[in-house]
Image (cartoon, rainbow, N blue to C red):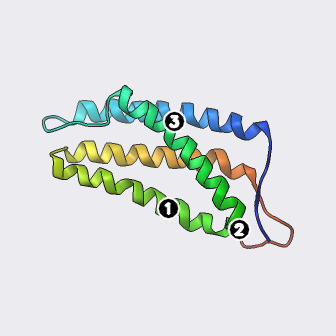
Amino acid sequence: MTATLAKSPAVATRLGLAALAAAAANAAIALAAGTLVSGGVRTGLAPVEFLPATVIGIVIGAIGWTLVARYAPKALRVVVPAALVLTWIPDLLLLNAGVTIGNVIALMLMHLVVATAVVTAMRPGVRRARGDDSAR
């Protein structure tokens, strides 16, 4: 009835690959936003800002996934989207500081990339117990 996190080096490998993929995708988003966004305050689009944040987000997301999967595996369907929406709140608050809407949308897309990377990396590690048909 509960999901457990598969313990294997494959999880670490998947997380590493997810971090690389997320960093590349976020670099592309930052590059596109940098060319499309003109004027106003710009924040979070420099590699020195978003690359460490991407890795930190992957690590925090993996820790959060592990804890939720261990204690309330059915809650993952609610917790993951809720956590993503919560990460967008500071982005939206940046509009009050004069950051352009294009910059804010880019940051929100970056958060979506990190969340997707964590889910993609961690989901194969969750195994359903026998008789648990709730994931269908």
Q: CA distance from mark 3 to mark 2?
A: 29 Å
**Considering the numbered disc 3 on the image, is that residue within a helix, a strand or a loop?**
helix
Residue sitting at x 80%, y 46%: 7
Front label number (1 vs 2): 1
Quadrant location of the C terminus in the rendered image: bottom right
Q: Quadrant of residue 20?
A: top right
Residue sitting at x 62%, y 54%: 65
Front label number (1 vs 3): 3
Q: In the picture shown, does residue 87 fall above or below 46?
A: below
In primary-sequence order, the first of circles 1 and 3 is: 3
Query: Residue extending furthest right?
Result: 130
Quadrant location of the N terminus in the rendered image: bottom right
Q: Quadrant of residue 126?
A: bottom right
Residue sitting at x 16%, y 34%: 38
Asked if residue 13 lies left or right of residue 56, the reply is right
- Amino acid of disc 3: Val
**Considering the numbered disc 2 on the image, is that residue within a helix, a strand or a loop?**
loop
Identify residue for label 2: 135
**Considering the numbered disc 1 on the image, is that residue within a helix, a strand or a loop?**
helix
Q: In the picture shown, does residue 57 fall above or below 52?
A: below
Q: Is mark 1 in CB contact (under 8 Å) with mark 3?
A: no
Whole-percent x, y for residue 125 in the image: 74, 50
In primary-sequence order, the first of circles 3 and 2 is: 3
The mark found on residue 81 in the picture is 1
Identify residue for label 3: 55
Structural crowding at the residue carrying mark 2, measured as other residues with C-alpha within 10 Å and reported as few (<14), some (14–19) or many (≥20): few
Whole-percent x, y for residue 83 in the image: 48, 59
- Amino acid of disc 2: Ala
Q: Quadrant of residue 19?
A: top right
Whole-percent x, y for residue 6 in the image: 79, 50
In primary-sequence order, the first of circles 1 and 2 is: 1
Q: CA distance from mark 1 to mark 2?
A: 16 Å
